Image (cartoon, helix red, strand yellow):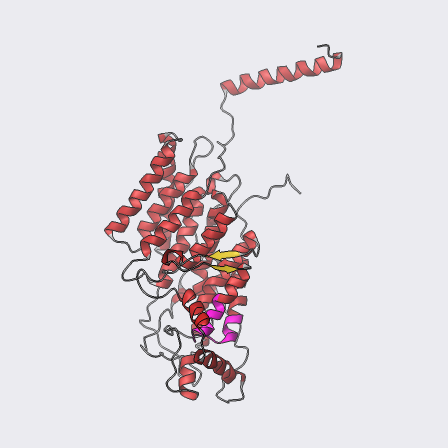
Amino acid sequence: MYLPKTQRKSSAKLLQAVLLLSLFYGCHKPDLPVLPRDESATVVYDWYKFIAMVQRPANPQPVVIQNIRNFGFIGVGLYEAVRPGSIGAESLSSRLYQMPAMPQADTWNQQYLWSESANAALASMFKSFLVLTDANKASIDSMENANYNRFSASTPDEVLMRSQGFGREIAAAIYNWSLSDGFNLSSVGYVPPPVTPGSWVPTPPAYANPVGPFLSDSRPFLEYSLTAMAPPLPFPFSEDTSSLFYKANKEVYDIGQRLTDEQKATANWWADAGGAGVGVPSPHHALSIITWVQENQQANLWKAAEVYAKTGIAFKDGPINTFRSKYHYNLIRPVTYVRRLIDTAWLSYLPTPPYPEYTSGLVGFYAPYIQVLIRSYGDIPVTDNAYEWRGLPARQFTSLSALLDEAALSRIYGGLHYRFTQEISIRFGKVLGNEIAAIRLAVPDYTHP
């Protein structure tokens, strides 16, 4: 084929450049990282579903707030275990309060399978953080080995072993960091403030001692959570029958007196109660929602890990901020007020937990992580199938916000909280969710507008 002289010169120069580059890279190793492949998050989803099955029949059931805290660390550890595989992603050690530097992977010179790193990290963290039987630990080992063997069909052993080692290094670093967070649910040494008519006091039928007065002293993930506090009550405590506070209690009482089967089902759905093999130990109800959303959105490994990390931050800091507010305001529970002023025999439909009323523990846990999901994927429709294993039909919601609203309403049906508490708790929790969602973990891609 005939080419004009100018095109012949251009082609010759291009060929010469290609030959020079080939010679150069044949003699020198390029100073470029080994690029990761776009890996599926299936191994992570499988692990979260598996560990829920492990903990469901536990007897006794896991301590709720402690289990939530543990899964917060696990989410952060998962992110750190796969982070080096995402070009430009930064460690949370530069974002979280007093988080130490994490082990580094040699991505410039070595290949990794990040799915195996996640596999090893999750298996190690579950065994470190969770209260498990020997049989539970053996089942975790079997799950880890099955995943490793599956990966070995397409990945060299040296890559798998390197990836496994890195995941375990991260798991150990995260667990060691967790040991210094000052987590404490005990009330030993707690001196309640002077009792007033509006003060929280132990509630029937168990009249248990308070739980978690020192939880707010635990080291949070965010510096914001060192001092975060819910706003003051929207109106003052009062026993006057014409007051807004009395009316708030009367509403809870009236709803409790005429609960429908549907309202009871809603209260039960979000209570996750019933003991081993009946309820869903926290935070597995929340994790089932997070996992459903991520699978539905087809998140890859790195996106999924980032969202598990950010929702994990919400798991830890949400209760810290909530309990700081609870013991600061020390507000009376509806069951105490109603039995004193309205109906001496009344009991809440759900058992009232042993700590003050304001703000809401459930909403303080749910609102931040739901806001993280909204900021990550939008206010999308969602299916909650947390009780599918019991044969209960899934609950469908038009949006994540609608799901949160129902969870908040369930505590009014249960007789545990005033409506104003739930409404303010949603707003308070969303502030934390937005703080978490604002954490930037990747270098912006300036090649796109």
Task: Tell whether position 298 is magenta.
Answer: no
Query: Which residue is nearer to you in this view: 291 or 443?
Result: 291
Residue 28 visible within the image: yes
* Above or below, comparing residue 227 to residue 159 in the picture: below
Query: Which residue is nearer to you in this view: 227 or 310?
Result: 310
* Above or below, comparing residue 286 to residue 19 in the picture: below
- Residue lying furthest left: 134
* Above or below, comparing residue 308 to residue 147 in the picture: below
Residue 23, given in percent of the width and then of the height, sits at 54, 16
Q: Which SS type dominates the magenta stretch?
A: helix
Q: On the rendered structure, is 352 left or right of 33? A: left
- Looking at the rendering, the stretch of residues picked out in magenta corresponds to 407-423
Which of the 4 quarters of the picture holds residue 338? Answer: bottom left
Quadrant of image for the N terminus: top right
Q: Residue at x 51, y 69 (%)?
A: 425
Task: Tell whether position 422 is magenta.
Answer: yes
Q: Residue at x 52, y 48 (%)?
A: 297
Q: On the rendered structure, is 6 left or right of 76? A: right
Residue 332 visible within the image: no
Residue 386, given in percent of the width and then of the height, sits at 42, 57
Query: Which residue is nearer to you in this view: 152 or 389?
Result: 389
Which of the 4 quarters of the picture holds residue 14? Answer: top right
Residue 180, given in percent of the width and then of the height, sits at 36, 56
Residue 150, given in percent of the width and then of the height, sits at 36, 36
Quadrant of image for the C terminus: top right
* Above or below, comparing residue 418 to residue 64 in the picture: below
